């Protein structure tokens, strides 16, 4: 296996701590030092099917943004589908899986100056099939950066747990990135977290400020998660959802809530609310709602459908009831998508400004 190309492994202390966000920004920052940067997510758990291949969605994102000039199947060699663990525990094939990861890494690293490897969670994720993040980092000969989220005590406690497993595998940790810190708390948290990590023999590589926009879903993402039918043809599905309103009141009382960035969730037979929403939605207006979700699988009458089809915002029809839809949207894990140009630009700027990339490079 290739051992000469510089590489780093991005891990996290838990799901949704900002591992992919950090990786996305780091690639842009690294390209200033290494013109040809490759990417691999050796073990992926959220995948899409492309040309009959299961590809981790983060690999699709990186390739869409950076044009990696490498087959997607090598950027995502192992996709953990629902039956994967049961099959492995019945017929363990660790040697074949390790070989697949190593071969894919060699292809990803071909003619590259640097390779960024992204893990799939904390150090122990994948242990059940003998491919924990710590074991994969060791297999690929990587040093590790751990991403965790804001605070002082909690991130240091969680980093310490991960540190123990990486050190058990003989994997060196370059340092830690703290994500999602409120802007006004950055100086204090930077000071105390740096002290706390130093006591553990670890470096603080940077503190990323919390950006509310990065946790906002688009209507397109919500449609995918709900499996909803699109009833019209809006100019875009990338409107960001700032707030959710359940239309369970009379139309007159609901109208004050029909403001910019709101996702209206209402049963499909509440035609009074739907028509009222339509009267406050205008083509080209920056103050329109983000979208409307009709619930209960209830389709309005023909005249109302015709009016909804003319709206410049997405109108979705979902089968679940309003409470279930609102709960799903609330619990949604927001992942950056290739079409999220505003978010991607912000992420690049944040990483360039707040992470010490030079220290990362020097440590390799």
Image (cartoon, rainbow, N blue to C red):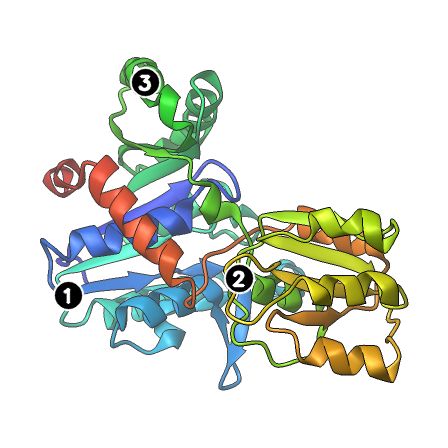
Q: Marks 3 and 1, Cα distance to the nearest angstrom?
A: 34 Å
Cβ atoms under marks 2 and 1 closer than 8 Å = no
Q: Which residue is mark 2?
A: 239
As displayed, is residue 146 above or below residue 256? above
Q: Which residue is mark 3?
A: 200
Q: Which residue is mark 1?
A: 36
- For the point 29% across and 13% down, which residue is it? 195
Give the image location of residue 207, x and y in percent. Answer: 31, 31
- For the point 31% across and 70% down, which residue is it? 103
Q: Marks 3 and 2, Cα distance to the nearest angstrom?
A: 43 Å
Q: Residues within 10 Å of mark 2 (few under 14, many from 20)?
A: many
Could you tell me how many numbered marks the image carries? 3
In the rendered structure, the answer to whether residue 51 lies left or right of residue 353 reads right
As displayed, is residue 81 above or below residue 28? below
In the rendered structure, the answer to whether residue 103 lies left or right of residue 18 reads left
Q: Which quadrant of the view contains residue 301?
A: bottom right
Query: Which of disc 1 and disc 3 is earlier in sequence?
Result: 1
Give the image location of residue 364, x and y in percent. Answer: 14, 43
In the rendered structure, the answer to whether residue 81 lies left or right of residue 226 reads left
- For the point 56% across and 72% down, which residue is it? 283
Image mark for residue 109: none
Nearest to the eye among marks 3 and 1: give it.
1
Nearer to the camera, 55 or 246:
246
Nearer to the camera, 86 or 190:
190
Nearest to the eye among marks 3 and 2: give it.
2
Query: Which of disc 2 and disc 3 is earlier in sequence?
Result: 3
Q: Secondary structure at mark 3?
A: loop
């Amino acid at each position: 296996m290739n051992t000469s190309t510089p590489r780093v492994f991005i891990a996290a202390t838990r799901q949704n701590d900002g591992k992919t966000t950090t990786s996305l920004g780091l690639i842009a920052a690294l390209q200033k030092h290494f013109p040809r940067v490759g990417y691999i997510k050796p073990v992926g758990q959220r995948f899409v099917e492309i040309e009959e291949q299961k590809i981790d969605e983060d690999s699709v994102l990186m390739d869409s943004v950076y044009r990696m000039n490498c087959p997607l199947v090598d950027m995502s060699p192992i996709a953990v589908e629902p039956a994967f663990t049961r099959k492995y525990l019945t017929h363990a094939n660790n040697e074949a899986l390790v070989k697949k990861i190593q071969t894919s890494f060699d292809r990803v690293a071909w003619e590259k100056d640097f390779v960024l490897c992204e893990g799939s969670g904390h150090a122990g994720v994948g242990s059940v099939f003998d491919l924990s993040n710590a074991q994969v980092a060791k297999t690929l000969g990587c040093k590790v950066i751990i991403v965790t989220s804001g605070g002082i005590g909690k991130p240091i406690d969680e980093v310490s747990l991960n540190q123990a497993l990486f050190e058990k595998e003989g994997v060196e940790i370059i340092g830690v990135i703290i994500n999602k810190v409120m802007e006004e708390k950055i100086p204090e948290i930077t000071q105390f977290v740096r002290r706390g990590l130093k006591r553990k023999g670890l470096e603080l590589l940077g503190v990323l400020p919390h950006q509310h926009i990065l946790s906002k879903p688009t209507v397109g993402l919500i449609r995918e998660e709900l499996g909803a039918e699109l009833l019209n043809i809006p100019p875009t599905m990338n409107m960001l959802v700032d707030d959710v309103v359940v239309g369970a009141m009379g139309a007159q009382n609901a109208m004050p809530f029909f403001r910019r960035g709101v996702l209206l969730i209402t049963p499909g037979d509440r035609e009074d609310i739907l028509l009222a929403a339509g009267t406050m939605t205008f083509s080209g207006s920056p103050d329109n709602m983000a979208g409307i979700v009709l619930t209960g699988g209830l389709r309005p009458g023909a005249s109302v459908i015709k009016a909804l089809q003319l709206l410049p915002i997405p109108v979705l029809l979902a089968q679940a009831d309003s409470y279930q839809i609102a709960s799903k949207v609330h619990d949604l894990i927001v992942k950056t998508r290739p079409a999220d140009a505003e978010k991607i630009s912000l992420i690049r700027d944040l990483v360039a400004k707040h992470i010490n990339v030079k220290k990362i490079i020097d440590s390799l």
